[in-house]
Image (cartoon, grey):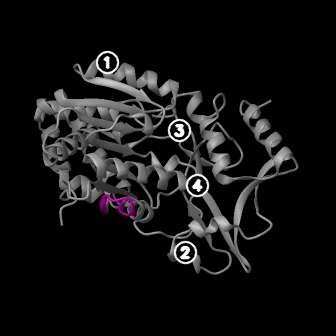
């Protein structure tokens, strides 16, 4: 019996009992099952894991986001306390680097910051506690399963590679309308199937996708839209800013973007539930539209390379190289290319900022 058999068997029983399940339900179970879910099992990050995120590539990423948070804090009048929230903090690397840079630039910001980490993985919570116990320098830290348990107040929120893992629904255009893509069983294997009739849920697809010809695939992420509306409502009521960095197109686009990664390689989405990371492209236009309808202002999205460049990535790299060995200097250059290069993360990844309705554009999003 393979190590993923318990979750696969559980999903098979679910389908036999109630029929095919949505892609969203499949993703939710594969990633968040209390016992066998991907994010419940182990630390997926790093060379020994399945993928590497920007904070793990270079300290420069987290440092620049820390300075971005300080700039936003000054824009809203330097309130004390201020909520510094991170969604999906990984190993705590981004927050540790952000706090170090922020304390050097504006100690008063760190004194005012009450840190709230939204994390469901017990394994990653332990990594975050270990990392921040060394670097937090007295910062107040509280963990949450969901954003809605974070208290009200002025907020600066960071979400790096968080929205891409939220469950999506997929629809395939047929001659008679949009049918939902589901997960069914075939000879004991989990396979994609289509709903027998057009799905009313397809009305949630962006307008730019609705008129696509047969064969087109559309995706929508209700969980992401609901979360961004919640963030926008908080910013509208209390002020602050949110920064969402993830991968996907700037405008809503058709296509199947659901993918699975294990040990840094793409694998079959349905073959290893619970053992592979499942993600999909983020629809930044849809997020921005939902935030603005909820009362906030949306800025961007901008390519990650442009955003980091505007924050001073090249200057930060130059300063690090000044005290580096030749080997370290090469690593710094390689990290800068990976974070900002047009053929690497710099173009595929985007940065979207949300602010209260009366606030100016935050750093990196000026006209």
Q: Is residue 344 above or below residue 205?
A: above
Residue at image coords 14%, 49%: 75
Does 25 lie within the magenta span?
no
Give the SS element for disc 1.
helix
Task: In the rendered structure, find residue 209 and report the number of the disc placed on it.
Answer: 2
Give the SS element for disc 3.
loop
Q: In this view, does 121 lie above or below 289?
A: above
Q: Which of marks 1 and 4 is nearer the N terminus?
A: 1
Would you name the residue on which mark 4 appears?
A: 168
Would you name the residue on which mark 1 appears?
A: 133
Task: In the rendered structure, find residue 197 and report the number of the disc placed on it.
Answer: none
Q: Find residue 253 and report its horizontal and vertical position in percent.
A: 50, 70
Number of residues whose C-alpha sits closer than 10 Å to that of mark 1, classed few (under 14), some (14–19) or many (20 or more): some
Quarter of the image with the N terminus in it = top right
Quarter of the image with the C terminus in it = bottom left
Q: Is residue 365 above or below residue 274?
A: below
Q: Earlier in the sequence, mark 3 or mark 4?
A: 3
> Residue 25 vs residue 109: left or right?
right
For the magenta stretch, what is the residue range? Answer: 292-300
Distance in Å between CA atoms under marks 3 and 2: 32 Å
Residue 328 visible to the viewer: yes
The label nearer to you, 1 versus 4, is 4
Task: In the rendered structure, find residue 50 and report the number of the disc placed on it.
Answer: 3
Q: Earlier in the sequence, mark 3 or mark 1?
A: 3
Q: Are marks 3 and 1 in contact (CB under 8 Å)?
A: no
Q: Quarter-wise, where is residue 141 in the image?
A: top left
Q: Which of marks 3 and 2 is nearer the N terminus?
A: 3
Distance in Å between CA atoms under marks 1 and 4: 35 Å
Q: Find residue 263 and report its horizontal and vertical position in percent.
A: 56, 39
Give the SS element for disc 4.
loop
The label nearer to you, 3 versus 1, is 1
């Amino acid at each position: 019996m393979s190590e993923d058999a318990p979750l696969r068997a559980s999903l098979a029983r679910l389908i036999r009992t109630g029929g095919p399940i949505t892609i969203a339900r499949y993703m939710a179970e594969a990633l968040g099952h209390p016992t066998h879910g991907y994010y419940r099992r182990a630390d997926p990050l790093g060379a020994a894991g399945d993928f590497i995120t920007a904070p793990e590539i270079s300290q420069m990423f987290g440092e620049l986001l820390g300075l971005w948070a300080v700039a936003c804090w000054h824009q809203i009048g330097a309130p004390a306390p201020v909520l510094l929230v991170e969604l999906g903090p990984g190993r705590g690397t981004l927050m540790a680097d952000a706090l170090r840079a922020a304390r050097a630039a504006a100690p008063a910001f760190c004194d005012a910051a009450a840190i709230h980490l939204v994390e469901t993985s017990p394994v990653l919570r332990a990594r975050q506690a270990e990392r921040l116990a060394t670097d937090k320098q007295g910062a107040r830290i509280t963990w949450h399963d969901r954003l809605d348990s974070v208290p009200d107040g002025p907020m600066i929120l960071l979400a790096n590679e968080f929205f891409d893992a939220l469950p999506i629904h997929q629809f395939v255009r047929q001659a008679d309308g949009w049918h939902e893509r589901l997960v069914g069983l075939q000879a004991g294997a989990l396979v994609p199937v289509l709903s027998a009739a057009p799905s009313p849920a397809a009305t949630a697809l962006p307008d730019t996708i609705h008129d696509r010809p047969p064969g087109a695939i559309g995706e929508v992420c209700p969980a992401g839209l609901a979360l961004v509306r919640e963030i926008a409502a908080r910013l509208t009521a209390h002020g602050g800013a949110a920064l969402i960095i993830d991968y996907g197109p700037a405008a809503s686009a058709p296509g199947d973007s659901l993918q699975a990664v294990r040990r840094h390689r793409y694998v079959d989405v349905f073959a290893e539930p619970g053992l592979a990371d499942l993600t999909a492209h983020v629809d930044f236009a849809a997020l921005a539209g939902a935030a603005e309808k909820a009362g906030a202002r949306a800025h961007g999205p901008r390519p990650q390379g442009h955003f980091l460049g505007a924050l001073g990535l090249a200057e930060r790299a130059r300063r690090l190289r000044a005290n580096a060995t030749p080997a370290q200097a090469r690593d710094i250059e390689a990290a800068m290319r990976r974070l900002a290069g047009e053929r690497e993360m710099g173009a595929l990844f985007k940065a979207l900022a949300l602010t209260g309705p009366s606030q100016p554009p935050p750093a990196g999003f000026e006209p």
